[in-house]
Image: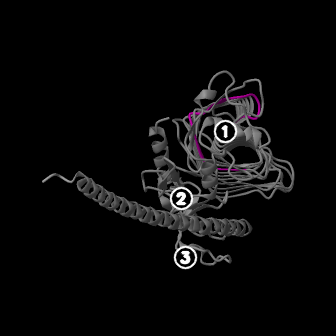
Amino acid sequence: MGIDFKSLLKQDEESLVIDRKKEAIKWLAILSAVLVVALIVVIVLKNLEDVDETRRIYVTKDIQNMRTYVENKANQAKADPNFVLPGISLDNQPITLKIHGLEEEYRYGYYFLNPEDYADTTAALLLPDEMYIVNYDTFDVINYNGIKYAGKTYYSLDDMVAIDAGLIIPSENTIIVKTAKDLEYLHQYPNSTFKLAANIDMAEYGVGEGWKPVSGFTGKLDGRGYTINNLKIYRPTESYIGLFADVKDTAQIVNVTFKNAQVTGENYTGILAGTMAGTVKNVICVEGTVTGVDKVGGLVGSLQQGSINNTKMQIGLVNGESQIGGLVGVLNSGKVYECLANVSQINGSDAVGGLIGSTSANATSYINECAVNFAEMSGTDDLGGLVGKIEILSANKLMVYDSYAVGNIAAGKTNMGGLVGYMRATNGAAVDISDVYVAVTILNKVETAGGCVGFSSLAVTSPSKVKSVFWEKNLAVGEELESIGTSDTNNILNFNSARADEMMVRSTFTDWDFDIWAIEEHKTRPYLKFEDSFKQYVQEIIKEKK
């Protein structure tokens, strides 16, 4: 019997068709499953994107509402000195967020808000469980939880817009600063708001004349707790020298630290600015030197008006000729409060002071809660532990409260005082001093050298007064000083002298506010409470890598 090849071929063809159908059905099923899974993934991702986008929109509106809230509270605080800003100050309990690979520490000048802090806001917040970090000076608002969007986490509107779009200027007037090059935009956009987002090393500007000071600054600089390292300026024949040449009255400079600043100019010279007419708050300078000729200060050469608040210096040298101060060279008018000047060496010729070189107080001016420590001061005329020279020639007033000066006036010829070297007030002008002490050694005990005032010239009709002001006697062997070295009028202020042991007990200072002051009985003289946190902060800054 022969083989029917035709039948076999037919059967093979039928089997092959069946197998191919089965294979096709199999792959069709697999492809369908893949498509279904892909569709599900797309839907899920889309939903996730929608969730992120929805949250971003809500939080963006939330932050905008919060900014309005912060601005309103800041305005209330300006109008009412007794108004307490909502939130917990982060000065001594910083919060660190990792933002775009950078560790950002929110500390000086920032407040932590919980929802209950802003429950009284008139604009209903869309996410009442959100928490925020705010700055009442610059109206900076940070979302503590972060805004999740497009696979990234953002903490503020400015950061989100700037980094997402790759921009330096994220909004109409806000510039994010991460490098020394970014600081160049200060020259280009002096009316803008600048926010540091990293520590800045200025070493690349350390050759030749160094950094070029910024002129006519009217904007805001918020350091956000970051440090500007190695600012170098060497322009000994130029005036108006500092990071800024001149700062206008609308400007604000807050929350920035300078480390190892070396600044040399002629007239109007300081680490921060040559002249200042705006607001300075929470600015710290450590490990620096300042050299100039006239109107030279560790921080600013001249404070025309405005205020310097909660600012501390711990630097090596302030050197010049006339109107030289550890913090400010010349105070024309304004407020200096909660400030500390620790300066190793202060040198000048005339009007040299541990805090302020000279002041005319062209309007009512204040020196409140200020501390001065200097190892050595040298000069010729008008040298004072706190202020070198006070000369008020119209019906204005200088008010000095809750402050102290400790140091050594090693070289001088005339008008040297532990508090003020030379003090003059004409008819109607006044110097009002309360709750102050000085412990300043004066080596050259001439006629115009005094434990408090070297030379006093107060008009008979001047309403000047002192209350609870002390100076420590017998700081050096053979010291024979009186409270006032020489006075040319019968209007003489009455200061209290005390021995070293009396200066170390609280009972000596019966009328003082020890919510402001602190003392370790029989161990220390009084000191201002804010100094403790500053000492800790300085040690942290000094240890940091540049």
Q: Which residue is mark 3?
A: 116
For mark 1, does the 10 Å Cα neighbourhood hold few (<14), some (14 to 19), or many (20 or more) residues?
some
Q: Secondary structure at mark 2?
A: strand
C-alpha gap between disc 2 and disc 3: 32 Å
Task: Inspect the image, locate mark 2, and give the three-letter code of the amino acid beneath it.
Answer: Trp
Residue 325 in view: no
- Whether pointer 1 and pointer 3 mark residues with C-beta atoms closer than 8 Å, the reply is no
At x 80%, y 42%, the residue is: 216
Of 57 and 285, which appears nearest the observer?
Answer: 57
- Whether pointer 2 and pointer 3 mark residues with C-beta atoms closer than 8 Å, the reply is no
- Position in image of residue 35 (x %, y %): 44, 62
Task: Inspect the image, locate mark 3, and give the three-letter code of the amino acid beneath it.
Answer: Glu
Marker disc for residue 517: 2
**Could you tell which of marks 2 and 1 lies nearer the N-terminus?**
1
**Image quadrant occupied by the N terminus:** bottom left
- Position in image of residue 371 (x %, y %): 59, 48
| Quarter of the figure with residue 181 | top right
Q: Which residue is mark 1?
A: 183
For mark 2, does the 10 Å Cα neighbourhood hold few (<14), some (14 to 19), or many (20 or more) residues?
some
Q: Give the number of the mark in front: 2 or 3.
A: 3
Of 164 and 367, which appears nearest the observer?
Answer: 164
Does 320 appear above or below 544?
above
The residue lying furthest to the left in this view is: 1
| Quarter of the figure with residue 509 | bottom right
Q: Which residues are magenta?
A: 252-270
